[in-house]
Image (cartoon, grey):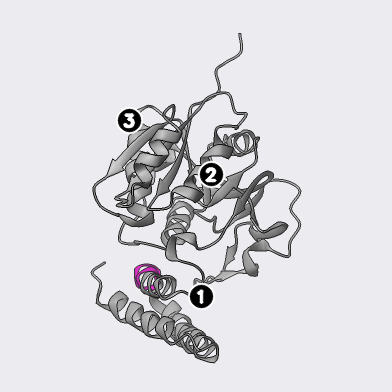
Amino acid sequence: MVDEAPLVYVITVNWSNAPDTLECLEKLVQLTYPNYRLLVVDNGSTDGSAERIALAFPQIEHLRLPTNRGFAGGFNAGIRYALAQNAAYTLLLNNDTLAAPNLLEPLVDACTPPDVGATAPLIFYADERTRIWSAGSNRNQWTLELSDNHGRNKHFEHPTEREFLSGCGLLLKAEVINAIGLFDDGFFLYYEDSDYSLRLRHAGYRLLVVPQAHLWHKVSRSSQGSNSPNERYWMARSSVRFFRKHGRGLQWLAIIPWRIGSAIKVSLRLIWHGNFPAVRAYWCGLKDGLQDTL
């Protein structure tokens, strides 16, 4: 008798973006893994997209939230729901992603050892299907910044240990979630995956990127695109929260000058391109991040 494959809940969050979510789901209903369920968490959409998605996919599960809780809050609601259904794993996917049919099998296989806390696929650009967007990353232990350019110039043949995995596509064990908790929903958008990766590592778990699993990402759809005022605001605000939360002792001697230099570099680049609304939003995000309560 063959044991039944462990139950995986595949969770994506929609916020007023039916076209991307519908395209994402069209791929997910074709997954070949034998024991999975799909859950769409609607993050307080007001444009009718929740109804449109439910009508197009009545066979999958839907969870509607009354307000937009951001990336972390939306996925936390989905994770709680999945754990209540006795899911063994949760796969978190951005709604602007396109999955390969065999996405789940290698991720689950690589996540089986007890010391592995999370696995992630190779994530490619949706408009450049062979160009890697993220293969996880390592981390500078002094500045806490991600290093090696998300593995974009590396070649991976086997599941490989990394210090950061992107929340764009992330498989988590139920037992690990129960051990270290949910995402910090103080991160409304961005850095919640970096925070969670650090928490996993501090708890002694390994993080693996699995090159046999493939995902394609449209990049920054939830914040109206890269370098939009909304994207720059939340990137800045969440970065301050992250470094305030994790910076320790002598690390601040590296973190402070590095972050000041980064802020100046980002601002000059935006000014060079005449993107003054994004410059203002970026500095408002830094200010608000400093005023946030941890």
Q: What is the spatial separation of the Cα atoms under label 3 and label 2, in whole angstroms? A: 24 Å
The amino acid on which the numbered mark 2 sits, given as a three-letter code, is Cys
Q: Quadrant of residue 127?
A: bottom right
Can residue 116 be seen from the camera position used here?
A: no
Q: What is the spatial separation of the Cα atoms under label 2 and label 1, in whole angstroms? A: 38 Å
Give the magenta part as a residue range: 240-246
Identify which residue is drawn at 36% across, 27% down.
85
Tag 1 residue = 142
Which of these two is toward me, 251 or 225?
A: 225
Identify which residue is drawn at 29% across, 52% down.
46
Q: Is residue 10 left or right of residue 179?
A: right
Tag 3 residue = 84
Which of these two is toward me, 155 or 190?
A: 190
253, above or below 12, in the image: below
Can residue 54 be seen from the camera position used here?
A: yes
Whichever of callouts 3 and 2 sits on the residue coming sooner in the sequence is 2
For discs 2 and 1, the disc positioned in front in the rendered view: 2
Q: Is residue 263 left or right of residue 137?
A: left
Q: Quadrant of residue 68?
A: bottom left
Identify which residue is drawn at 39% across, 31% down.
61
